[in-house]
Amino acid sequence: MAPTGKRTGEGTRSSGPPLPNSAGYLDGRLLIAMPVMGDPRFERSVIYLCAHSAEGAMGIIVNHPAGSIDFPELLEQLGIIKKGDHIKLPENAESMKVLRGGPVDTGRGFVLHSSDFYIENATLRIDDGVCLTATVDILRAIANGSGPKHAILALGYAGWAPGQLETEIQSNGWLHCDADTDLIFGDDVEDKYNRALQKIGIDPGMLSNEAGHA
């Protein structure tokens, strides 16, 4: 699940200054969109960064619902369950969130989940508590009750070319902060943006366009 290039509709940018932390990379952290970003696809978005290296970055938006589709309906479309079988689904599958994960590869599903579930050669362990799996096997496991305790399904992802994310951060496009499981997996999708800002001590109503990092 390595980064796979630039965001849809954007060209590659030259590398920017290094990020202001010791490691230089932000995988396992949250990006919070600033108002000056100017990209409607990422307006008021909170993104969990799954991978960030010299090769680029890849992340999942965790606070933009995919629309009217729900998880049981998606399982039916994929042929994992038969029509009407959703009444037999475990509770966490019935209520699982389907999100718009980003503008790249929107026809593909990416499951962010707790680390109590792992598929050899398919699951990327991002940190101690969060993993990413993009195979249909995890959807089958969730449907039959053997999946992870916490999970969200995202359609598509956000991707950056080498140096592009660094440039956007230095241009005041993003704030970043430590991730927590509630912000990633919480049910209150619409409130995650405000809660992410509050986590780093920013009043959403007083958000300025000046740069800042947690």
Image: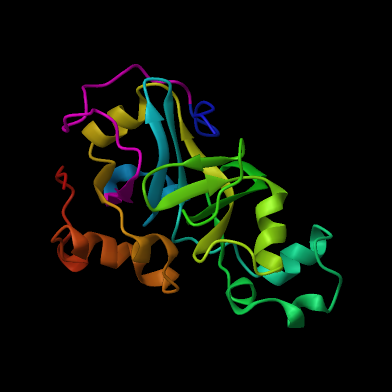
> Residue 81's quadrant in the figure?
bottom right
Q: Residue at x 42, y 26 (%)?
A: 56
Q: Would residue 41 appear left or right of 200 to someone viewing this image?
A: right
Viewer-proximal residue among 155 and 130: 130
Q: Main secondary structure of the magenta part?
A: loop
Query: Tag count in the figure?
Result: 0
The part of the chain drawn in magenta is 11-35
Q: Quadrant of the N terminus?
A: top right
Depicted 25 relative to depicted 202: above or below? above
Give the image quarter of residue 85.
Answer: bottom right
Residue 102 shows in the view: no
Q: Quadrant of residue 143?
A: bottom right
Q: Residue at the location (21% across, 22% down)?
A: 17
Colour scheme in the image?
A: rainbow
Q: Is residue 8 above or below residue 188?
A: above
Choose between 121 and 184: the one closer to the eye.
Answer: 121
Q: Position of residue 13 (x, y in %)?
A: 39, 20
Q: Position of residue 185 (x, y in %)?
A: 44, 64
Q: Is residue 124 visible?
A: yes
Q: Looking at the image, which residue is at 31% across and 18% down? A: 15
Residue 181, horizontal then vertical, whole percent: 36, 61
In the depicted structure, whether residue 214 falls above or below residue 93:
above
Seen at 44% across and 24% down, the residue is 161
Residue sticking out furthest to the top: 14
Does residue 158 belong to the magenta stretch? no
Q: Position of residue 49 (x, y in %)?
A: 39, 42
Q: Is residue 20 magenta?
A: yes
